[in-house]
Image (cartoon, rainbow, N blue to C red):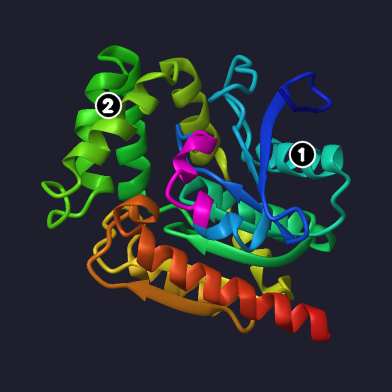
Amino acid sequence: MPFAHVPDGTRIHYEVFGDPRGEPLVMIQGLGADRRGWIRQRRAFGSRFRCVVLDNRGVGRSDKPTGPYDLEVMAADVVAVLDALGLDTVHVMGVSMGGVLAQIVGVRHAERVRSLVLACTACRHLPWRRELLAEWASIATVRGMRALVDEAGEWLIGPRSRHRFRPLVGMIGPLALQVAPESFVAQIEAILALDDDVRFELGAVQVPTLALVGSQDILTPVADSEEICSLVPGAELSVIGGAAHGFNFENAGAFNRAALDFLQRSVARVGSA
């Protein structure tokens, strides 16, 4: 199994799939999720890109050091994977917490980035979201991950899709149960500790950027993506109607079409520059 080794000794597991001649695309998952969270993107993106998926520290096959974690360090983990593969520049796509990591990579390691897709994510803390994440950390610690999955479901899946996607949720849910509560909480602590420095630096991003969000997302509402677009010069906003926070699997077809259209236009734009 391939691993990238980072300065603190942590091993970050990654996988490469797709068109070996395609442009490289690194895909970063969100809170508590590992590379398997991209299951509904593999065929669509793999047919066009050389895709790199990784397990953030604390999940999947990556090491699970004692927390708390740091999002700046987790973004550096992504860059370490690129170094291990010998990739100088890549397209970067992140969902939720992965979208925050993508923003940090875009700001701190701008020379490594060809374009950014920032899906169902935000660039600032809001008091209610801080309280919610702290509550999730408490549930995971006291009652365990099964209780957390039950509690968080309504924030991730839109009301119109809960019945239709019940079998899929039944498949994805057990993946979350494999995450140790300590690692889940360590990732939450990393999110809560992030300051606003990155938000203030988004104006320096010079690569094509897409903010992608579901119209029914109540965890990172459309206003969060609108704010990102107001800060990143030339950023595009795409809103998927009827989709909620987990729309890369809830509304995978619409997610894939929007992201792929943007990425293919970005490839053409970068190639002609």
21 lies above or below 272: above
Query: Which residue is denoted by mark 2 in the rendering?
Result: 148
Residue drawn at x 41%, y 17% is 181
Residue drawn at x 80%, y 80% is 271
Amino acid carrying mark 1 in the image = Val
Q: Position of residue 53 (x, y in %)?
A: 62, 42
Residue 135 appears in the figure: no
Decide which of tag 1 and tag 2 comes sooner along the chain.
1
Q: Nearer the viewer, residue 33 or 85?
A: 85
> Can you say which quadrant of the picture contains the C terminus?
bottom right
The magenta stretch spans residue 235: no
Q: Position of residue 253 (x, y in %)?
A: 37, 63
CA gap between label 1 and label 2 equals 30 Å
SS for callout 2? helix
155 lies above or below 152: below
> Can you say which quadrant of the picture contains the N terminus?
top right
Q: Residues within 10 Å of mark 2 (few under 14, many from 20)?
A: many
Q: Position of residue 21 (x, y in %)?
A: 78, 59
Query: Which residue is denoted by mark 1 in the rendering?
Result: 81
State left or right for residue 223 relative to residue 147: right
Amino acid carrying mark 2 in the image = Leu
Q: Residues within 10 Å of mark 1 (few under 14, many from 20)?
A: many
Residue range highlighted in magenta: 34-43
